[in-house]
């Protein structure tokens, strides 16, 4: 595979995503119109009541006094210039708000991907190697229990055990707001705060990947090319690491790509429990405030994230399995 | 890290020993939890509850208040009301500087009242309606000129209610989308430091604060934690030190109170006076009948609700005006709905109203909307549902999200009965009139007269009380008013919530105003 063709493939894929993202934006915009109540009443409600003139004034400022199609047209027009609008509730441009939250979200998503994929693949691999022994059963049972446990419960229990009882980790937040560390100490502090949220979010996906990996390994082991390899006189170890493992990874990687959307959703819960300042919490707040500019911005950003991750997954395929060609 | 903590402790102990025993110790960081995160830090255009918890520390008001709701000097050293009540002269402090170093003058007062609060503040529009001008004969005198006497103004000048903003900053550009909306500049004990969205706001000590030697704290960090259990855990562990106004669930507050390092105070709501109530749609049968409304009010078991839903953080409401106004003489009780034979009375009223029990023992049924403010409201709805079953009335509960509920209650009036949470605030003119005055029946405006009940007599009493400068005379007007409202019962007043404030015992003097956590924390210090 030449690098030139990879580059043009990526460019073409990115171009194809534009209509997808535009579609997502339009559908979201129209869906949000269906929710009763609007930002002006929420703002007035938060303010503990306000005169009618104040509310009308707000609506005119938000452009909510215009027909829906005009609002949609204006939104799309601005989007072309990457202008995601202004959040009147938060008194700040949407893009600025999103970019500030993107870092923590990517950090949590990244660490969760690494932990859940790494441990999940390892557990699946071991279970497959020890298939139908007590070790395999232990891994499978643990995976099922973890998979079936609600995220918020896991999160709260981890806080109770590791934060309150054992005092190993802080309960919440991204860094110590009394000390305000700098430099290396800050890095360590953030990593320290990252442990519990990552663990909570990882457990669910870890179980998923472990089960998938185990099944995939077992399936691959029974295929013809393994018999061929064995006939060639290759060692079992080599067959497992070079052939079976690599092929077994494909479905797991596919699943990881598909799950990024879900990961964003799951992070809403985890971010709320651990007061992690990511996009999930922002989405949750803005939905209940009917802050549509901000919410549309978040949807847009999430759509872009999911598209990019899936593109990365497709590129990873090529490296894992030379039979898969791009184009 | 541990070595550093030990060192810090050692240093702190040494410092403590070398200080005179009575002196307040300076320094330290107080971590406050505020829920939810404020949308912005612009208290001059929004009265959203979490905003004030942060900005009351950054801005000053002309006055502050004692627990008796009597004014105390702040930016204004003194004030004088003219005999006809139509002008108020404020003498301002001369040594006040804003956080950017510019001096505070009467120009700032004029600008804040006339250009900012009177035009944009959701409550200021009503409070300062009768202020026709603010004269500034010199840099340190501000005279409010009023069309009619308005005693409410003197109750509404705290840093929370009417923050004084610097004209040279907020006078530039559009006040509604001002560049400093999220980076406030005031004259208060703490300067705005940083706001990391989703995490915290950091406020730093204002070294040039006009109250010499204050504030004691070096830093104030306001954290935002969306999950209630995590908020409790952070307080329990000492990662956060103060939380109030519903940030900690009532049952958790009770649990935390048992811990040796934590104190739970119910002071600091005297000027907020939250009321839990049931709002009737008086334009719709069967609740267009005052007898039915009274019957429901009798049936509601106030003491059970307080003990089991609000975990003891409340007292039975005795009418439309909160008992917190007792010290200022504006309080008077209405009909006592907590009498021992209240169920019999309720049954009798419903019989009289023409709703006899049918064969299955019920009289009528309706849908009860629930204020979407959290779990306790759901439980409150269930309690009322059971109370009403006793008198043969069947309630079906409906729970929606806030925007939908606001629209249903205050725009579409598409409800029969809804629970509601309305604050009496600093004065009945601010918090009480809006609920029953005929000029506050305004579709689309939230937290006003949602029952759409009014009467010419009560309107007249309120109009008189609003312009009556004499407190005792006002009290008499309100006593008559409360009685009339409770006879009509467009709203069943259930309880006055006394919000628990959870405080880490390391810190002293946290709640020292009737505004509680809306105070400025200048005198908070470590033990």
Image (cartoon, rainbow, N blue to C red):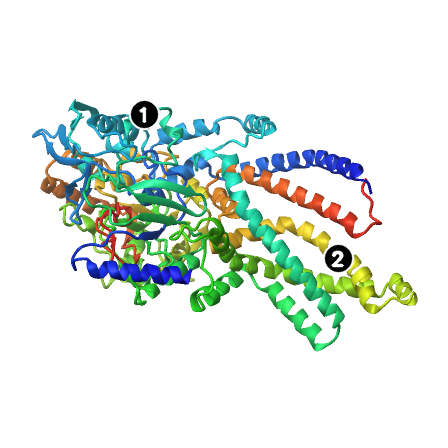
- Which image quadrant is residue B151 in? top left
Marks 1 and 2 on same chain: no
Image location of residue B404, percent across then percent down = 46, 43
For image coordinates 33% across by 30% down, the residue present is B120
Image location of residue B208, percent across then percent down = 24, 39
Q: Which residue is mark 2?
A: A249
> Would residue B390 be seen by someone viewing this image from the given angle?
no
Residue B323 disc label:
none
Foreground of the two, A35 or B67 = B67
Q: Which quadrant of the rendered structure holds the N terminus of chain B? A: bottom left
Residue B171 disc label:
1
For image coordinates 55% across by 37% down, the residue present is A297
In the image, residue A159 above or below residue B367? below
* Residue A15 relative to residue B39: left or right: right
Q: Are marks 1 and 2 in contact (CB under 8 Å)?
A: no
* Residue A94 relative to residue A137: left or right: left
Chain hosting mark 1: B
Foreground of the two, A115 or A282 = A115
* Direction left: furthest residue: B83
Q: Secondary structure at mark 1?
A: loop
* Residue A294 relative to residue B174: left or right: right
Q: Which quadrant of the rendered structure holds the C terminus of chain B? A: bottom left
In the image, residue B505 above or below residue A258? below
Image location of residue B15, percent across then percent down = 24, 58
Q: CA distance from mark 1 to mark 2?
A: 63 Å
* Residue B71 relative to residue A232: left or right: left
Foreground of the two, A198 or B4 = B4
What is the crowding at mark 2: few (fewer than 14 residues within 10 Å), some, or many (at least 20)?
many
In the image, residue B278 above or below residue B177? below
- Which image quadrant is residue B62 in? top left
Q: Secondary structure at mark 2?
A: helix
Chain hosting mark 2: A
């Amino acid at each position: 595979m030449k690098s030139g063709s990879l580059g043009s493939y990526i460019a073409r894929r990115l171009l194809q995503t534009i209509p997808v993202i535009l579609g997502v934006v339009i559908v979201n915009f129209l869906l949000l119109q269906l929710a009763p109540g609007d930002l002006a009443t929420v703002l007035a409600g938060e303010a503990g009541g306000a005169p009618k003139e104040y509310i009308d004034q707000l609506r005119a400022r938000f452009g909510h006094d215009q027909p829906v199609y005009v609002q949609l047209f204006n939104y799309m027009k601005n989007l072309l210039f990457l202008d995601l609008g202004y959040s009147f509730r938060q008194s700040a441009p949407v893009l600025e708000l999103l970019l500030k939250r993107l870092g923590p979200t990517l950090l949590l998503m990244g660490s969760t991907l690494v932990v859940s994929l790494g441990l999940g693949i390892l557990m699946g691999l071991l279970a497959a190697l020890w298939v139908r022994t007590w070790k395999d059963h232990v891994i499978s049972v643990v995976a099922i229990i973890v998979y079936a446990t609600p995220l918020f419960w896991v999160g709260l229990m981890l806080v109770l055990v590791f934060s309150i009882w054992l005092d190993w980790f802080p309960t919440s937040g991204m860094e110590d707001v009394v000390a305000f560390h700098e430099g290396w100490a800050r890095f360590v502090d953030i990593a320290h705060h990252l442990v519990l949220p990552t663990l909570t979010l990882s457990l669910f996906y870890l179980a998923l990947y472990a089960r998938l990996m185990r099944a995939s390994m077992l399936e691959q082991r029974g295929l013809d090319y393994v018999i061929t390899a064995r006939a060639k006189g290759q060692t079992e170890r080599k067959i497992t690491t070079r052939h079976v493992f690599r092929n077994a990874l494909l479905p797991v990687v596919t699943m990881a790509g598909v799950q990024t959307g879900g990961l964003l959703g799951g992070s809403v819960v985890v971010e709320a429990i651990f007061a992690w300042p990511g996009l999930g919490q922002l989405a949750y707040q803005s939905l209940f405030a009917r802050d549509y500019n901000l919410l549309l911005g978040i949807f847009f950003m999430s759509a872009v994230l999911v598209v990019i991750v899936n593109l990365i997954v497709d590129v990873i395929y090529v490296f894992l399995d030379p039979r898969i060609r791009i184009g | 890290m541990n070595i550093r903590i030990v060192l810090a402790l050692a240093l702190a102990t040494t410092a403590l020993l070398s200080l005179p025993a009575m002196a307040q110790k300076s320094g330290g960081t107080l971590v406050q939890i505020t829920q939810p995160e404020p949308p912005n830090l612009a208290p001059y255009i929004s009265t959203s509850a979490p905003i004030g918890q942060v900005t009351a520390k950054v801005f000053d008001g002309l006055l502050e208040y004692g627990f008796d709701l009597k004014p105390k000097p702040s930016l204004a050293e003194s004030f004088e009301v003219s005999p006809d009540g139509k002008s108020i002269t404020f003498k301002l402090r001369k040594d006040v500087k804003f956080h950017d170093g510019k001096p505070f003058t009467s120009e700032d007062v004029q600008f804040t009242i006339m250009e900012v609060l009177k035009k944009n503040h959701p409550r200021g529009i009503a409070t300062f309606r009768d202020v026709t001008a603010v004269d500034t004969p010199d840099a340190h005198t501000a005279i409010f000129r009023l069309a009619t006497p308005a005693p409410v103004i003197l109750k509404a000048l705290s840093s929370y209610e009417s923050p004084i903003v610097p004209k040279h900053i907020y006078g530039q550009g559009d006040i509604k989308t001002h560049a400093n909306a999220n980076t406030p500049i005031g004259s208060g004990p703490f300067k705005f430091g940083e706001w990391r969205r989703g995490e915290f706001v950091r406020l730093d000590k204002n070294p040039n604060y006009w109250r010499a030697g204050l504030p004691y704290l070096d830093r104030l960090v306001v954290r935002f934690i969306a999950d209630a259990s995590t908020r409790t855990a952070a307080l329990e562990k000492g990662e956060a030190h103060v939380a109030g106004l519903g940030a900690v669930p009532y049952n958790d507050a009770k649990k935390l109170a048992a811990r040796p390092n934590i104190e739970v105070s119910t002071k600091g709501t005297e000027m907020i006076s939250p009321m839990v109530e049931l709002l009737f749609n008086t334009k719709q049968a069967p609740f267009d009948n005052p007898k039915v409304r009274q019957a429901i009010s009798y049936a509601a078991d106030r003491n059970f609700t307080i003990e089991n839903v609000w975990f003891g953080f409340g007292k039975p409401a005795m009418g439309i005006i909160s008992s917190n106004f007792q010290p200022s003489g504006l309080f008077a009780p209405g009909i006592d709905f907590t009498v021992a034979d209240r169920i019999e009375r309720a049954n009798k009223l419903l019989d009289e109203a023409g709703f006899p029990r049918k064969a299955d023992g019920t009289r009528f049924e309706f849908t009860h909307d629930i204020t979407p403010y959290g779990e306790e409201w759901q439980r409150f709805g269930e309690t009322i549902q059971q109370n009403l079953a006793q008198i043969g009335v069947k309630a079906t509960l409906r729970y929606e999200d806030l925007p939908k509920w606001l629209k249903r209650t205050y725009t579409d009036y598409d409800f029969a009965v809804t629970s509601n949470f309305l604050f009496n605030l600093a004065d009945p003119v601010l918090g009480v009139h809006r609920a029953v005055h005929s000029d506050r029946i305004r579709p689309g405006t939230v937290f006003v007269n949602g029952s759409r009940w009014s009467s010419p007599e009560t309107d007249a009493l309120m109009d008189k009380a609003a312009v009556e400068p004499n407190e005792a005379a006002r009290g008499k007007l309100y006593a008559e008013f409360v009685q009339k409202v409770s006879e009509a019962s467009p709203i069943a007043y259930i309880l006055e919530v006394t919000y628990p404030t959870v405080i880490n015992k390391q810190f002293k003097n946290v709640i020292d105003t009737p505004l509680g956590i809306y105070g400025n924390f200048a005198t908070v210090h470590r033990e």
